[in-house]
Image: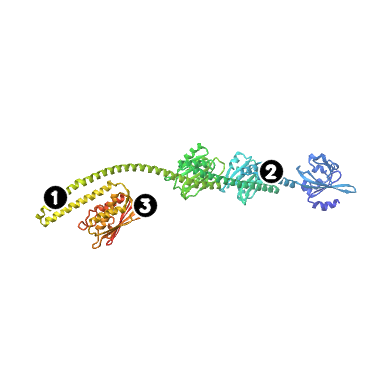
Amino acid sequence: MSSVLRSALFPAALDCIISIDPQGQITEWNRDAEQTLGYARAEALGQFLSDLIVPPADQETHQNVQRFLHTVNDTGQTISPVNQRLRLDARRRDGQTFPCELSVHALHREDGPLFAAYLRDLSDQVQAQAHQAALYAVSGKLAQAVTPAEVVELILREVMPAAQAARGSVGMLLPGGDHLRLLGELNYDAQTRATLANFPLTFDLPACHVIRTGQAVFGSREALHRQFSDLAQKGPQELMAAAALPLQAQGRVFGYLALVYDQPHTFAEADQSFLTAIAEHCALALHRAQLLEDERAARGQLAFLAEAGAVLASSLELQTTLDHLADLVVPRLADWYAVYLPEGEVLYPYGLAHRDAAKVSLLRDYVHQAPVRIDSSSGAAEIYRTGTHLHFPHLSPALLAAQEISPEQQRRVQELGLHSYMAVPMVAHGRTIGVMAYALAETQRSFTAQDLHLALELGRRAGLALDHARLYQQLQESHSTLERRVEVRTHELELQTQELERSNAELEQFAYIASHDLQAPIRAVTSFAGIIAQRYAGQLDDRGQLYLQQIIGSGEHMKRLVDDLLTFSRIHTHQGDQVLVDSQAVFGEVARRLASEDMEGTFDLSATGLPRVRANPQQLDQLLQNLISNGLKYRREGVRPRVQVSAVQGGDFWRFAVSDNGIGIEEQYFGRIFEIFQRLHGRDTFEGTGIGLAVCKKIVERHGGQLWLESVVGEGSSFFFTLPVE
């Protein structure tokens, strides 16, 4: 049997097979036992099994086979391993203990019993179970975290110990895609923490490699220092081994998990699989928490914009609106905040704010030392001109050097501690009216794409509010200007009224002179000329008779001219009361007067259905008298004169028409005939003073109406005038 076991069964077995005699000495030792326990077959044969594989703490229990065959378990019960599968601890040659499964079977021979022990190394199984339990515990706790900060805190508190790491960190890629930011760390020294707080992806570090390639990194201190040139200077000095694993979701690497070991550590395949699985759970938890955070942020942004709309609509005062904007933005969205509005050739900072009011003076000094010209090629000026925006999640020295600012201004920016910046246009009705600038300094975060979206939306709402406030301010200024102009104009009108009263008084005096002083000499001339004609007509020859008739005619014309001037002047000074007047009755009175002068009935007058209007009766009489008389006067040869008066209502006015069939008037003279002393015919053709139509126009205008005509030469004319409806 011994030769059979040794030649066939023992080499093919996948477990340790050890045979022992009743005294506990080893009689056989297969190849797997050599690999698992570390002893060569030649070394093991003849040795007591308890001396080779039993841990020191269990030596007394296994002094001989009989005692070995009656083993005490953890509960104090004595059990026999024969024909049973037991879980025990065994010892390797190097002194390391490991869990195993043991099964002992008795082989009966003529010379006495022989025992065959089957031992299986359970280290991988136990480690896998431990990994599974740790993974289950970690995933359960991660599932309860609802914010990214809670997930990071759990990773540091639970994942690091589960991975047996002494220190480590969690970081994520910033929105710009060129920098990494430290989310949390465990047991880093101050220098390492400051170096890795925010660092570019160009660093030659395991974390950067993980982000760029999506591949995990495992290695010892020496191997990692050879592979990554920046690790020795920028990484933890205690590092003896490390693992860097990608955090990815939906096919995108968004962060890293770094595990640092202070003691030499090898990463077996099982270890790498375990750490990779943990990193996947961390990534899922962090991604889920970030989605929840984004959802909360979206709801918060909606609430913020709703509040902003209400606050911005609460006032139309420009400065109050600027103050409201500052209160909205700081500190909820930014640490630093400024509003730039155009002022001549520069963008002037009208609104400045900081979460620490004492620091506002620093920002004010900076912006006043660096005025933003509208025609400059970068910064707020470009946003104002083009309506674009700026978003710098991380303000690097290289980025600052690319701006159009002096070294002193760059030093000021660094002094202010700005590490993230964005600026957006303020838009109203499709045009940019200003720029809103935001910066982070004290807050340990960077502006995200969601922050930019919120700032753009706030810029649109603030632009409308500010535009309304500026329009309101301009309206207020216009009102003030208008009030001043009204005051000035009122004073001017008062002076003009006084001047008009003085002028009217002079006209009154002129009318008195015209009716008395001027007419007296005229009456004397015409009277004496009449006496001469009566008494001395027989003594004058024909030429003397002609001269005498010219004197009499001229005197009478002068009298009519003075009378018409008096009438014209009284229209200026004596408008008279306006009352309800029956225009049909006024026409009848005028027609009777004209008919009494025409005993032979040489003309026709007609009017029907003329309305009641509000007018001065005497002036309405004068108006109809002059217009009808003109129609009769300028008659065509051989045609019986006919004048018709009619009226139609149009809106708030009555439109009267006085139409005749006379000689007509050429269109080029339509305006001239209403001017005083303007005549189209000589006195030898048609008698008149050239004042009648000027009097008509003045009367109509005094009543708030208009006077015009239409005429066809050789057919007649129609004079139209309007008077208000009753």
Farthest residue to the top: give it: 358
Secondary structure at badge 2 equals: helix
Q: Is residue 646 left or right of residue 528?
A: right
- On residue 149, the disc is none
Q: Is residue 420 left or right of residue 691?
A: right
Packing grade of label 1 (10 A; few <14, some 14-19, many >=20) is few
Farthest residue to the bottom: give it: 638
Packing grade of label 3 (10 A; few <14, some 14-19, many >=20) is few
Q: Earlier in the sequence, mark 2 or mark 1?
A: 2
> Label 3 amino acid?
Asp
- The residue drawn where x is 10% and y is 55% is 538
Residue in the foreground of this view, choosing between 25 and 113: 113
Residue in the foreground of this view, choosing between 373 and 576: 576
Q: Which residue is mark 3?
A: 652
Q: Earlier in the sequence, mark 2 or mark 3?
A: 2
User: Mark 1 and mark 2 in contact (Cβ < 8 Å)?
Assistant: no
Kindly report the distance in space between the C-alpha atoms of the residues bearing marks 3 and 1.
Answer: 55 Å
- On residue 162, the disc is 2
Q: Which residue is mark 1?
A: 528
Residue in the foreground of this view, choosing between 569 and 581: 581
Packing grade of label 2 (10 A; few <14, some 14-19, many >=20) is some
